[in-house]
Image: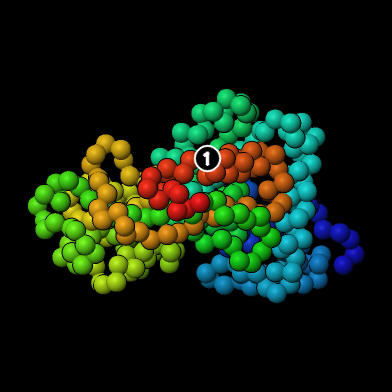
Amino acid sequence: MHSLPEWTDLRFFLELARAGTLSGASRRLDVEHTTVARRIDRLEQQLGTTLFDRSREGYELTEMGQTLLPHAEAMEGAALAATEQLGGAEVAAAGVVRLGVPEVFGTRVVAPLLVKLFEDHPDLSIDLLALPRFANLANREADLGVMLDPPSTGRYMVTRLASFRFYLYAAPTYLAKHPPIRTHADLERHDFVDYVQDRLASRELSYLNELGFTPRRRLCCSGMTAQIEAASLGMGLMMAPPYAVPDDGRLVPVLPGFYAERSFWLAAPTDLYRLRRVKVVWDLLRDLADNNPKLWWHNGDMGKAA
């Protein structure tokens, strides 16, 4: 290697590593895909090594590419931090933050919080990725994310956001037309609404397996929004955390003593966590989780949760 690589070439390397295809990286960088290919070829020639394995499916990092990745990410983080500080953003958060959250949590809980956040930080913008899956932080789909499975490898800041419980709910119209539910054994005679089992975003969402019998799933959906609507229309019982259940009476608790407990985790790449704009959103979610127990537990369970 005769000279240090240019930072712009490393940006192309990072985006191709995250996107996995020339077309994906070119969209992220707003350039032609041929430009991406040319810059990667130049970087590999300059470093004297192959950074990507090419195939018809796309680009995959080689062992040397994996070695370069954390160094390039550290440089990216330093560049972002320097830009913030030089722009005075260390005092007032500014810029765009991409926040990945589960769909119902994002819609019912996070979105309303943004009104006050924007009042306090008028130069801050949020891309709220309210998804029926969990945002991929490894390819920088989001700057930070709420998830059931925290990253186990890589450079991340991770904290347990909240422990919560999935409870059983049903529509009053469903309960009026079906046998009464007085004990756990009565559940075997009822229909359920659940996730599509081979499309689960996390194994943590297989909570109906904790019933102790194979439930009769009459309708399976890819997301919880559709499940809530189906259960509200009387198609079967469903399990959901308190924050997800509308307060309009369309769903009521069933057999409150049964629940499945899970935890939400909050994670961000270490280099992005240091940015003022990301830290502001991180602190907002932490404050939400710590001071709103009714989102996570039924009233009678709050003392037990402590």
Can you give x and y, in whole percent of width and height, for residue 216 in the image?
A: 21, 66
The picture quadrant where one finds residue 69 is: bottom right
Can you give x and y, in whole percent of width and height, for residue 20 in the image?
A: 58, 63
The colour scheme used here is rainbow
Q: Quadrant of the N terminus?
A: bottom right
46 to 297, vertically: above or below: below
- Dot 1: element: helix
Can you give x and y, in whole percent of width and height, for residue 212 in the image?
A: 29, 71
Horizontal placement of 239 versus 70: left or right? Answer: left
- The residue lying at 26 percent from left, 56 percent from top is 255
Q: Residue furthest left?
A: 177
Q: Residue furthest right?
A: 2
- The residue lying at 49 percent from left, 48 percent from top is 101
- Between 304 and 297, which is closer to the camera in this rendering? 304
- The residue lying at 38 percent from left, 45 percent from top is 299
Horizontal placement of 6 versus 56: left or right? Answer: right
Is there any visible trace of residue 131 in the rendered image? Answer: no
- The residue lying at 46 percent from left, 36 percent from top is 111
Kind of residue at badge 1: Asn
User: Dot 1 corresponds to which residue?
Assistant: 291
155 to 111, vertically: above or below: below
Horizontal placement of 186 versus 63: left or right? Answer: left
Q: Residue furthest bottom?
A: 63
Can you give x and y, in whole percent of width and height, for residue 97 in the image?
A: 60, 41
Is there any visible trace of residue 205 in the rendered image? Answer: yes
- Between 61 and 143, which is closer to the camera in this rendering? 143
Mark 1 nearby-residue class (10 Å; few <14, some 14–19, many ≥20):
few
